[in-house]
Image (tube, rainbow, N blue to C red):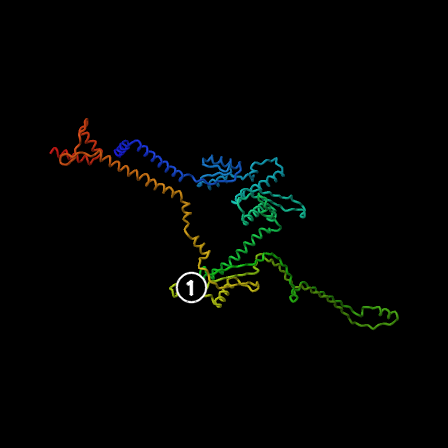
Amino acid sequence: MNNVMSQLVNVIRSLPLSRKISIAFTLALVIAGFALMFMWANQADYQVLFNNLSPEDGGAIVSKLRERNIPFKIEANGTVIMVPAEKVHELRLTLAGDGLPRGGNIGFEIFDHTDFRTTTFVQELNYRRALQGELARTINQFKEVNSSKVFIVIPKESLFVEESKPATAAIQLDLRSSLAPAKLAAIIHLVASAVEGLEPGQVTVVDTKGRIIFKGGDGDNPPALLSNAQLDYKGKVEGEIRKNVQSMLEGIVGIGKAIVRVNAEIDFSRATLNEEEYDPYATVVRSERNIEESAQSSEGTAETAQTLINKRRGVVPPATGAEKRNTKKDVATNYEINKITRTILKPAGTIKRLSVAAVIDGTYTVGTLQDGTTKRTYIPRSEEELRKFEDLVKRAMGYSEDREDQISLNSMSFSETVSADALTESTGSKFDIMKLVGNYRRTIVNLLLVILVFFLVIRPLLKGLKKMTKAAMSETMELPAGTGGYPRIPESPGTGQKETALELSKSNPEKAEQLIKGWVAEKE
């Protein structure tokens, strides 16, 4: 290998200066290009650690990163900090354990250093500030929210119920994108649940553009939230009925040959009905009183006023031994009338009426025309088939005559194009090669660079070295033929045959073997 390299060096030295410069310049460009490509392919992928940071939070996070010797980038005038992608989630958890970022709001860490000289008023004020800060930090975790402010008003407690006032809250949101109604409801209920005595209807939400996103109302369910819930519930009811009916029809006539649409009228009003029913024929004894008095007297001993008058006149009444008995009864019975009391709570979301429209495809016959072409002929469904299908649809949708439900079922010729739903399903089930390339792009780029380096640099260099080595050896190792056809060493001044033979044995053993055979032949 050392001889090959020395020969290569000798060949390069023998080249003209212009050729040497061009070869060196080409090699330098190739090496620099591939070095840049490797550096670009293997550079660290930085992702956002935190954005919309306040100067205080940014400085605290940067100091923590420097303590851990973690590379980072600062962009957007210090409001965005980026770190290598593989460390984003770990750093977020680590910094969250340190209470960073604080979001520019003071949280419950305000009570880390207590002062016994603090008055009750200041303690209550600090608690309200901490609660507002913690709620703002929580709301800032939504990806649609840049920043937020929460203002809570907790009235003083009163001894009189009539003078008590409910708690209220106001939320200001700086949005980077539109906020979905479900997430808006989540923010409102989050604040309402965190503050004692605060109802969702007492929360007002505005944005930094001066628009009222939500205005509180009375009751447990504010009007805006109830409206969103109504639309969501209505869509779920219609979608479930449509899915049941369409899957049944497609199982009979074929996939993509049935179209079903459902419209549901939902009654969202709530009512409480109190009923009292009296049954006059069903009575129960509530209480009963039975008093009996009896008195007995003898007429012979009892003197009336007439007897006394007769005695005064000298008339003596006859003596009789008859007795007199007096009996008195008092019976009172109180009956309880049978009464049934009902409290009926009518829930919101009952179905008032259902309207279902269904269209099914007919059948087709394929015929051959005189010119040899085929023609599909549409055959509509018969009335008997439509009645059977209509009966099945009624069963699947939960048809009710009391609600005056409506159903329309027709048979029509469908287009031959693939339905949008089937196309979506087939597209979604395909192998996502672009996602795979995005996940393994670094590995793929590195493999391509290695292949390019091998075919564009290493392989041509190996071929060139082989050619130059062969050429140099053919020029330096050609020896004139001697006795017996074997080569002989040309004599050069100052160098004997032994020294030349030793050098030849080192560089080319085969030539040295032939040379020794020539010497043996000459001596014989």
Quadrant in the picture for residue 524: top left
Q: Residue at x 82, y 72 (%)?
A: 319
**Extreme-top residue of the structure:** 494
When the figure is inspected, residue 61 is found, relative to residue 345, above or below; the finding is above
Dot 1 surroundings within 10 Å: few (below 14), some, or many (20 or more)? few
Quadrant in the picture for residue 520: top left
Could you tell me how many numbered marks the image carries? Answer: 1
x and y, in percent, of residue 377 in the image: 43, 65
Quadrant in the picture for residue 286: bottom right
The residue carrying mark 1 is 376
**Extreme-bottom residue of the structure:** 318
x and y, in percent, of residue 206 in the image: 58, 45
Q: Residue at x 56, y 37 (%)?
A: 112
Q: Residue at x 58, y 36 (%)?
A: 114
Look at the numbered disc 1 and give the secondary structure of its residue.
strand
Q: Amino acid at mark 1?
A: Arg
Q: In this view of the protein, can residue 437 be seen by the observer?
A: yes
When the figure is inspected, residue 469 is found, relative to residue 354, above or below; the finding is above
x and y, in percent, of residue 297 in the image: 78, 68
Image position of 148 (left or right of 483): right
Q: Quadrant of the N terminus?
A: top left
Image position of 293 (left or right of 34): right
